Amino acid sequence: MSATRPLHAAQILFPVVDDCLQVGGIPLTRLAQRVGQTPFYAYDRAQVDARVQSLRAHLPAGVELHYSIKANPMPALVQHLAGLVDGLDVASAGEMRVALDTGIDPADISFAGPGKRDAELAQAVAAGVCVHAESEREIRALARIGAEQGIAPLLVLRINPDFELKGSGMRMGGGAKQFGIDAEEAPRLLALAGELGLDVLGFHIFSGSQSLKADAIVETQARTVDLALALAAASPSPVRMLNIGGGFGIPYFPGEARLDLVPIGEALAVQAARVRTALPQARLSIELGRYLVGEAGIYVARVIDRKVSRGQVFLVTDGGLHHHLAASGNFGQVIRKNYPVAIGNRVEGKEGAGREAVSVVGPLCTPLDLLAERMELPHADVGDLVVVFQSGAYGPSASPSAFLGHPTVVEVLV
């Protein structure tokens, strides 16, 4: 008889029917046949839709939602999200091409990141994409390129604030950073932009990512608006765009709770009112990547060998760190922790087979190729499917796919 039940907290978005994980309503075994090979990533579009709808329900009216493509630049996924969000944020000319292919208004695409080459800036100006300038060199280059093309660049200044998002997994602001223009330097560069005849549309202030603490996000958003209002006084043009970043995290490890959107939405309503009063022409936006797609994706690899070494069981799969660097613990983790993992085609396991502590490894000739270390899982054999959850963000595009020459991974949107 068919039985449906959720998995533990990090996995509840994927139901289980007859002991087999379901992805987009499709049994994992059938999806693997449909894809035609392992390893692969699968992203559930219904989960992406639900996440955007939840955010819209909690965010105050008038606050725009942008998707940061660097989290997952798969073209089909970006195309899908382009119809759900208000803007796309890119960090390279390659991502810019993916965004432009969606048909979204180029003015709703923002291009951030340090070290933009002149050729990339020229592409952005020609396309009508909004450039988030991160240095004096970029400001001067935009003035020159705009004059050469006869096109007024769309320009926002990215600001490095003198504070950071507390408790964030990755600090993008505060202190010395390669990102953005130091807040104390901004008035001088705003004046320079005015002297060069550039129309500065506003500010992008991003201070951190992957925070699960609502109070920290609330505090950072308030400080960000404070800074933006102070800088607006030095702007040569009225502020029409204000991107206050994101920082919303997702739970990866045991003991982590989901981010509570209620206090964030309530506090952001207060900040939005301040912006409307002080900067009546400004479009206020938040920028999210991982939060929109991270939990909607899984990574699937097949067991190709089962071996015991001095009493320890190893499941050797056809996938690994070359496809999923983050799950291996080599993408920002200080102390390695296991992502949530399951045997997707036998989530509870065969009756009487029991559970066992196993290490799931890949085929690479390095001990770093580790997807799960001494993790309790149902007994698995050659041919079974290992699933790594929380894999919708920073997967293949953030992994060394060419390492040791193994085949590249497939991505599907279901």
Image (spheres, rainbow, N blue to C red):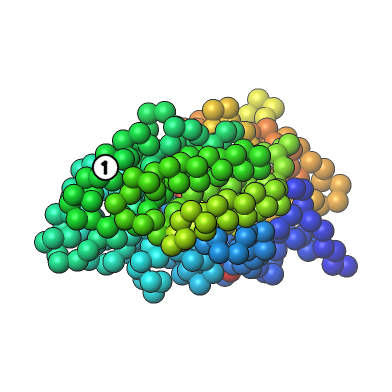
Instruction: Indicate the secondary structure of the residue bearing disc 1.
Output: helix
Q: Of the residues shown, which amino acid type is indicated by label 1?
A: Leu
Left or right, 298 with respect to 407, comes to right
The residue under label 1 is 189
> Could one spot residue 41 in this view of the protein?
no
**Residue 249 picture location, percent across and down:** 60, 45
Residue located 54% across and 69% down the image: 84
* 265 sits to left or right of 204: right
* Residue 314 to residue 28: above or below: above
Please name the residue shown 52% across and 58% down the image.
276
Residue 150: percent from left, percent from top: 15, 66
Seen as rendered, the residue at the extreme left is 148
* Mark 1 Cα shell of 10 Å, populated few (<14), some (14-19), many (≥20): some
Query: Looking at the image, which is closer to me, 387 or 266?
Result: 266
- Quarter of the image containing the N terminus? bottom right
Frontmost residue, 388 versus 69: 69
Using the rendered image of the protein, determine whether residue 166 is visible from the camera's viewpoint. Answer: yes
In the image as oriented, which residue stretches furthest toward the bottom?
103
- Image coordinates of residue 402 in percent, x first then y, are 36, 46
Figure quadrant of residue 414 = bottom right
Residue at x 38% of width, y 46% of height: 233
Q: Is residue 257 left or right of residue 302?
A: right
Image-quadrant location for residue 101 = bottom left
Comparing 309 with 113, the one in front is 113
Q: Which residue is at the far top?
A: 310
Q: Position of residue 337 (x, y in %)?
A: 62, 33
Q: How many marks?
A: 1
Which residue appears at 73% of the width and 36% of the height?
255
